[in-house]
């Protein structure tokens, strides 16, 4: 079963390397798994990435797995490094800029699930920068 497909109401297992890759924008690749009430994604941010301020109806909770980036949420700016987390309520504006030379990998969760990602073409499953090999 494709773990990036529509929400599911039954259990399933997947490996990060088996999840089809979504190119959310130039420099951002996500490997999402959708549940009935949540989307979980391993997200790779390339070095030098600048994602403009945006907002969405999903609550967003995440943690940095490797690297670092600068996050501006609701007008407050912080550098987020390995082990740092965040919570963004629905409709709060936020922007991202990667600051490390190696880019960054984060785990993001969204509730409700990211239905807007369903129209993004999926690439083939492929290993990312995390987990380390």
Image: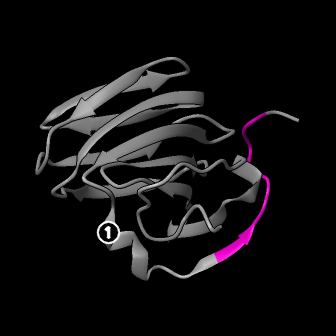
**Element assignment for label 1:** helix
Residue drawn at x 56%, y 68% is 22
* Dot 1 alpha-carbon crowd within 10 angstroms: few under 14, some 14 to 19, many 20 or more: few
Relative to 36, is 64 on the left or the right?
A: right
The answer to whether residue 106 is above or below residue 83 is: below
Query: Is residue 87 located in the magenta-colored stretch of the structure?
Result: no
Picture colour scheme: one colour
x%, y% of residue 44?
Answer: 59, 49
Residue drawn at x 59%, y 34% is 100
The boundaries of the magenta stretch are 123-131
Q: Quadrant of the N terminus?
A: bottom right
Q: Observer-nearest residue: 82 or 18?
A: 18
x%, y% of residue 12?
Answer: 60, 51
Residue drawn at x 37%, y 56% is 51
Relative to 118, is 72 on the left or the right?
A: left
x%, y% of residue 46?
Answer: 60, 52
């Amino acid at each position: 079963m494709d773990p990036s497909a529509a929400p599911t109401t039954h259990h399933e297992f997947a490996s990060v390397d088996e999840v089809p890759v979504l190119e959310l924008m130039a420099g951002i690749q996500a490997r999402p798994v959708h549940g009935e009430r949540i989307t979980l994604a391993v997200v790779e941010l390339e070095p030098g990435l600048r994602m403009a301020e945006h907002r969405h109806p999903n609550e967003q909770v995440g943690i940095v797995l490797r690297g670092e980036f600068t996050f501006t949420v609701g007008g407050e700016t912080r550098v987020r490094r390995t082990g740092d987390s965040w919570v963004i309520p629905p409709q709060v504006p936020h922007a991202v800029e990667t600051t490390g030379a190696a880019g960054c990998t984060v785990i993001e969760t969204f509730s409700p699930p990211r239905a807007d990602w369903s129209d993004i073409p999926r690439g083939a499953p492929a290993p990312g920068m995390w987990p380390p090999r």
